[in-house]
Image (cartoon, rainbow, N blue to C red):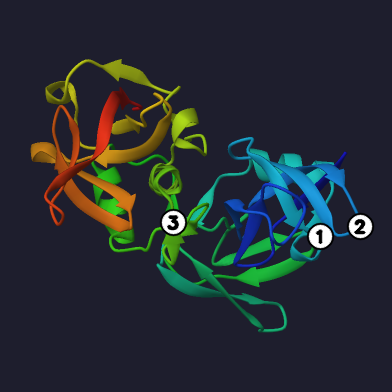
Amino acid sequence: MQFGICNLSTIAVRLEPTNQSEMISQILFGEHFKVLEQRKKWSKIRIAFDNYEGWIDNKQYIEISEDNYNAVNASYKFLSGELIDFIADQNDDLIPVSLGVTLPFYKNKVFKLNESIFTYEGTTFTGIKSKESLIKTAFMYLNTPYLWGGKTPFGIDCSGFTQMVYKLCGYKLLRDASQQATQGEVLSFIEESEPGDLAFFDDNEGIITHVGIIMKDNYIIHAYGKVRIDRLDHSGIYNIDSKRHTHKLRVIKKII
């Protein structure tokens, strides 16, 4: 089996091995993965963080050894803490990166991908944060435009938003809303929830298609058109701008 790591700011993970296929997720700089299948131009991968699978362009990552893959897995995690910043390689070439990229083996503003040395001088997230930190972190993405499969402040989807907020605070969520709904403890009523808990919403077929982060006083922050704040009640999300319910509440989960 082969292994790889992302050495670009953000790359698309696609449903099928073609540029015309839909983007189902993104890999950010420093994220590592297993290569399940390799073709001439495309590789099917499984991302280490959440076991999500999809296809990426062979030109958009570098191979690493199994030992390096395992070492990255076991290393203490540092994530970039700036909305946008730059990483400098050993030739002083700059790579733009966004909030939440991984900095493998980071120490004293320096880290490595394979044998290449990089420098990052911005703020970082590391360790497990308090539950109260989730809302403060979520606000960093406020007004980010909605993008199917997106995971950055330049475009994000509903479950990418919740996953990245939790990741920055030291917790693991799966990638899709329906997958995240399998995690945590079910709460019976909104009144039992705390800021940072997750609310899930389903469609007319009962399939969970949306997720948001509960705030205090019956508000919710979620990605719908953009990352926005709306009202939450027992029916679902009440959109403050359109003055109507846009999502039907299915379940509330306490993750931490």
Above or below 189: residue 143? below
Pick whichever of labels 2 and 3 is earlier in the sequence: 2
Residue 80 seen in the current view: no
Q: Residue at x 44, y 62 (%)?
A: 155
**Dot 2 amino acid type:** Lys
Q: Quadrant of the N terminus?
A: top right
Q: Determine the CA span between mark 2 and mark 1.
A: 8 Å
Which residue is the site of mark 2? 40
Q: Position of residue 10 (x, y in %)?
A: 60, 63
Q: Quadrant of the C terminus?
A: top left
Q: Residue at x 74, y 44 (%)?
A: 45
Which mark, by number, is residue 227? none
Which residue is the site of mark 3? 156
- Label 3, residues with CA under 10 Å away: few <14, some 14-19, many ≥20: many
Q: Residue furthest front?
A: 204
Which mark, by number, is residue 58? 1
* Left or right placement of residue 52 versus residue 188 in this view: right
